[in-house]
């Protein structure tokens, strides 16, 4: 549905060239929620803004529904932008207009007939749960409510794609959850493809199907959210995924554990989570497994279990036990300190 091919973007600031995007290729499928995660300055905003040409790439191509959007004239671009809604961290509401008007005015400017404006404004305010606040002004709303108005305003154009530029970054955790729930509903019930950027792992974890990890203007890893959580490959991905969800072991304990056996991190996915693998291991091999720490990451459609396990026994018995765990489709990683 959206395809970026070898996209680069260089900003000229005085005599300096800032390479915000360097040869980025990525594809977002129809109907999915695709997230890009990266630290500040990675190039996420520039990337998402290339999709509706708020930024024009310096090189590369951008396709939306197979249309090469860089070749569109002004009219074509206007038509394209109607297909693509966008929400921002700062909401961008009109302070002097009430909730109803914030949704209705852009429709009026687009030339939508009067009765249609009323019908759509009421419909989308209902969907975001703000029908009863239609006369309130932005200054009378909470951050979460303001973002709901912005979402209703974007939806009222009946787009096929919703771009979300850090839409929950200014919100507290509970409000973030409720906005993420709303985005899930928009995706499921209205069939709108969502392309979002964020620096918060929680956003990716809760609602995304696939994710790309960005660093210094490049995409360093792309995959399903499950894969990225279970088998992160690149250092930056590991930092995101494990920085928040893996166990930190006190150095002295780590040293003692490594001196008296092997320490392994086990990741359980899908069916492997139901097998009593450690009990079988203890019966079948001359190895004593001890659970040091554990946790579960809840993703959109599935959970991933992690156990940090100490294995005590003769080296060859431990090796055989590790092979057994791998045969049980458990992801095994040795922890070396
Ligand atoms: N209009 C601009 N003019 C000059 N430099 C820019 C412009 N927009 C972005 N940049 C630079 O491009 C790089 C990527 O910025 P971008 O905003 O895309 O990153 P980001 O990952 O979205 O980070 P943040 O969340 O902090 O916005 C940064 O070095 C930034 O300073």
Image: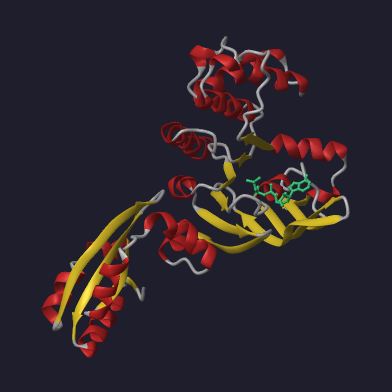
User: Is 269 on the left or on the right of 321, as rendered?
Assistant: right
Q: How is the image coloured?
A: secondary structure
Instruction: State the image coordinates of residue 337 (x, y, percent, origin top left).
Output: 36, 73
User: Whole-percent x and y of residue 269?
Assistant: 33, 62
Residue occupying the point 28% across, 82% down? 323
Please say whether residue 240 is visible from this viewpoint: yes
In percent of the image, x 45 and y 31: which residue is there? Answer: 175
Q: Return the residue nearer the eye: 244 or 189.
A: 244
**Residue 164 to residue 247: above or below:** above
Left or right side of 89 for 271: left
Q: Does 173 sit left or right of 50 as displayed? A: left
Residue 249 occupies which quadrant of the picture? bottom left
Residue 48: percent from left, percent from top? 67, 47
How far across and down, in percent of the image, does residue 198 sit?
Answer: 56, 46
- State the image quarter where residue 162 is shown: top right
User: Residue at position x 20%, y 66% from top?
Assistant: 291
């Amino acid at each position: 549905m959206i395809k970026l091919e070898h996209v680069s973007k260089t900003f000229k600031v005085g005599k300096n060239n800032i390479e915000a995007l360097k040869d980025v290729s990525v594809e977002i499928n129809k109907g999915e929620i695709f997230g890009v995660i990266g630290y500040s300055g990675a190039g996420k905003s520039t990337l998402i803004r290339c999709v509706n040409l708020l930024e024009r790439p310096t090189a590369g191509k951008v396709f939306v529904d197979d249309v090469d959007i860089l070749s569109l004239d002004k009219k074509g671009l206007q038509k394209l932008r109607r297909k693509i809604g966008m929400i921002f961290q700062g909401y961008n509401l009109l302070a002097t207009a009430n909730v109803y008007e914030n949704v209705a005015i852009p429709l009026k400017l687009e030339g939508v007939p009067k009765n249609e404006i009323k019908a759509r404004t009421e419909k989308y305010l209902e969907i975001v749960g703000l029908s009863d606040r239609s006369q309130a002004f932005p200054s009378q709303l909470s951050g979460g409510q303001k973002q709901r108005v912005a979402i209703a305003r974007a939806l009222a154009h009946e787009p096929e794609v919703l771009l979300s530029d850090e839409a929950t970054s200014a919100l507290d955790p509970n409000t973030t959850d409720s906005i993420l729930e709303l985005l899930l509903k928009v995706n499921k019930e209205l069939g709108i493809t969502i392309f979002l950027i964020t620096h918060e792992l929680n956003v990716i974890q809760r609602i995304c199907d696939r994710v790309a990890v960005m660093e210094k203007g490049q995409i360093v890893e792309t995959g399903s959210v499950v894969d990225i959580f279970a088998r992160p490959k690149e250092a930056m991905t590991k930092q995101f995924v494990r920085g928040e969800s893996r166990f930190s072991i006190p150095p002295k304990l780590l040293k003692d554990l490594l001196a008296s056996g092997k320490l392994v991190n086990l990741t359980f996915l899908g069916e492997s989570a139901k097998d009593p693998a450690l009990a079988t291991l203890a019966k079948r091999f001359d190895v004593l497994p001890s659970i040091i720490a554990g946790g579960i990451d809840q993703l959109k459609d599935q959970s991933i279990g992690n156990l940090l396990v100490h294995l005590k026994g003769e080296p060859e018995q431990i090796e055989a036990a590790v092979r057994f765990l791998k045969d049980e489709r458990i992801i095994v990683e040795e922890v070396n300190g």
